[in-house]
Image (cartoon, rainbow, N blue to C red):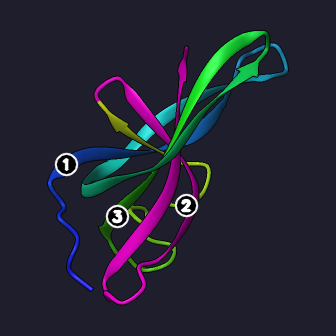
């Protein structure tokens, strides 16, 4: 299997909850680091969410591996940012056949 082409710079972000002063919380995102990525299209479709049409595109994003627990190792619930585009991480696994890389299965949702 060939090595991935990590030619796209993206930023890994994680959610952080902060008290809103009224007993609830506000969810903000903080940047964990910049990563060179390979982004490959998997599939796409359209659905209705809250009465609005939403286009969902699924991708595989490959990054260099990091040890389990390291802040720059993606986990489900985090996201990648590329400018104004957001890619929600759904699952992460080791890349088969090529050591030292992780494959992140992500969704990008856009109002249609």
Q: Position of residue 109 (x, y in %)?
A: 55, 29
Q: Identify the disc placed on residue 95.
A: none
Report helix, strand or loop for mark 3.
strand
Q: The C terminus lies in which quarter of the figure?
A: top right
Q: Nearest to the eye among marks 2 and 1: give it.
A: 1
- Left or right: 44 in relation to 60: right
Q: Which residue is mark 1?
A: 8
- Coordinates of residue 31 in the picture (x, y in percent): 38, 41
Q: Nearer the viewer, residue 107 or 63?
A: 107
The image shows residue 50, relative to residue 3, as above or below, that is above
Residue at image position (75%, 15%) is 21
- Quarter placement of the N terminus: bottom left
Report the residue at 38% width, 28% height from top.
85
Q: CA distance from mark 3 to mark 2?
A: 13 Å
Residues rendered magenta in the picture: 83-112
Q: Which residue is mark 3?
A: 62
């Amino acid at each position: 299997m060939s090595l991935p082409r990590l030619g796209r710079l993206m930023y890994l972000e994680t959610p952080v909850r902060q008290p809103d002063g009224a007993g609830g919380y506000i969810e903000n995102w903080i940047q964990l680091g910049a990563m060179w990525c390979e982004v490959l299209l998997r599939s796409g479709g359209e659905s209705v969410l809250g009465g609005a049409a939403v286009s969902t595109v699924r991708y595989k994003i490959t990054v260099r591996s990091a040890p389990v627990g390291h802040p720059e190792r993606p986990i489900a619930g985090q996201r990648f940012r590329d400018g104004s585009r957001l890619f929600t991480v759904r699952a992460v696994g080791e890349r088969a056949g090529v050591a030292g890389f992780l494959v992140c299965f992500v969704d990008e949702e856009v109002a249609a």
